[in-house]
Image (cartoon, rainbow, N blue to C red):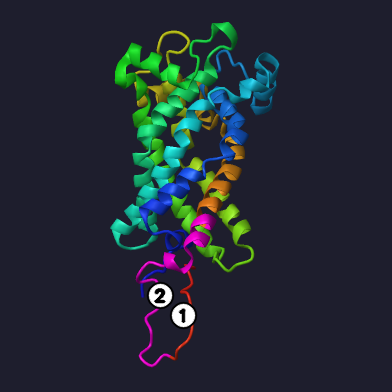
Amino acid sequence: MGRASGLLERASPGYPERWATGAGCSGPGLPTFHWALSFQVRLQVQSMEKPQYQGTLHCFQSIIRQESVLGLYKGLGSPLMGLTFINALVFGVQGNTLRALGRDSPLNQFLAGAAAGAIQCVICCPMELAKTRLQLQDAGPARTYRGSLDCLAQIYRQEGLRGVNRGMASTLLRETPSFGVYFLAYDVLTRALGCEPEDRLLVPKLLLAGGTSGILSWLSTYPVDVVKSRLQADGLRGAPRYRGILDCVRQSYRAEGWRVFTRGLASTLLRAFPVNAATFATVTVVLTYARGEEARPEGDALPAAPAAPAGPALAQPSSL
């Protein structure tokens, strides 16, 4: 007997539903927790030779004191523009890749998530480049960029298409495996928690599974994210320092040791749980209750016995 599909796969096996729901679930979590991204980037790229911040709390206090509360939301416009398309791509591509692979297995869950992560880099990389540059630029009249589009336009005029896609290789190295972990962890956790549409505790379980999946996803490739941030910020204040990914890793490790690759992790995880809990729970609940029993793909139901009595069909459990 084949492995039963997980709740997300049974809720929406097709691309249009996932595309629309993924695009629609990008709402309040981003502006609410964008301040954590400001800490993450600033802590990741600062030099320990002349450290500006002593930790997450000191970073928060410094931003408030020097730039007011608005400083916490620098660079918000870029992810606001891109996240709708990213979520639509991620959930749509993951669902269709899983269907194309033909079997819902842990390996295929990872591969489908990895494919989704790789494809969305086309939007994610320029979006994060603009966000990083805006978060690190000086406040007030001395600022270089007026907004996300102005930032990308200036980079394109000065460096061409290659400049707009700076950090693409490191973004691919981060997003491809991390999204594989993301969807695999969510599938395993929802099965282990027994998430079913009729469960009265469905939403709390989905929130727990989604938030934990987000944390595991970040932990799986966080050092690569530090390298990506440093490459995208390189040259913003002074001459460029790094010749590529390996050179960035070598210089960073030589100057600051292995702890450099965990810089900003606390604020990242602080944001990861609530944002991903809300994202996964929203997508799963909306698709589950919008489609109901129509969401069951062929092959999920148990084969009927030849002389089975008439009555309502029982759903096959989705636990491992």
The residue depicted at 42 percent of the width and 44 percent of the height is 88
Q: Residue 301 carries which label?
A: 2
The answer to whether residue 183 is above or below residue 232 is: below
Tell me the residue at 41%/48% (across/down).
19
The amino acid on which the numbered mark 1 sits, given as a three-letter code, is Ala
Q: Residue at position x 47%, y 74% from top?
A: 315
Q: What range is drawn magenta here?
A: 285-308
Compare residues 215 and 121 and report the one nearer the observer.
121
Horizontal and vertical percent for residue 260? 52, 27
Does 239 appear above or below 25? Answer: above
Measured as percent of width and height from the top left, residue 154 is found at 39, 13
The N terminus lies in quadrant? bottom left
Question: Would residue 102 be counted in the magenta stretch?
Answer: no
- Residue under label 1, please give it: 313
Q: Is residue 258 left or right of residue 118?
A: right
Q: Nearer the viewer, mark 1 or mark 2?
A: 1
- The x and y percentages for residue 240 are 40, 12
Asked if the residues shown at circle 1 and circle 2 are in contact, with their CB atoms under 8 angstroms apart, the answer is yes
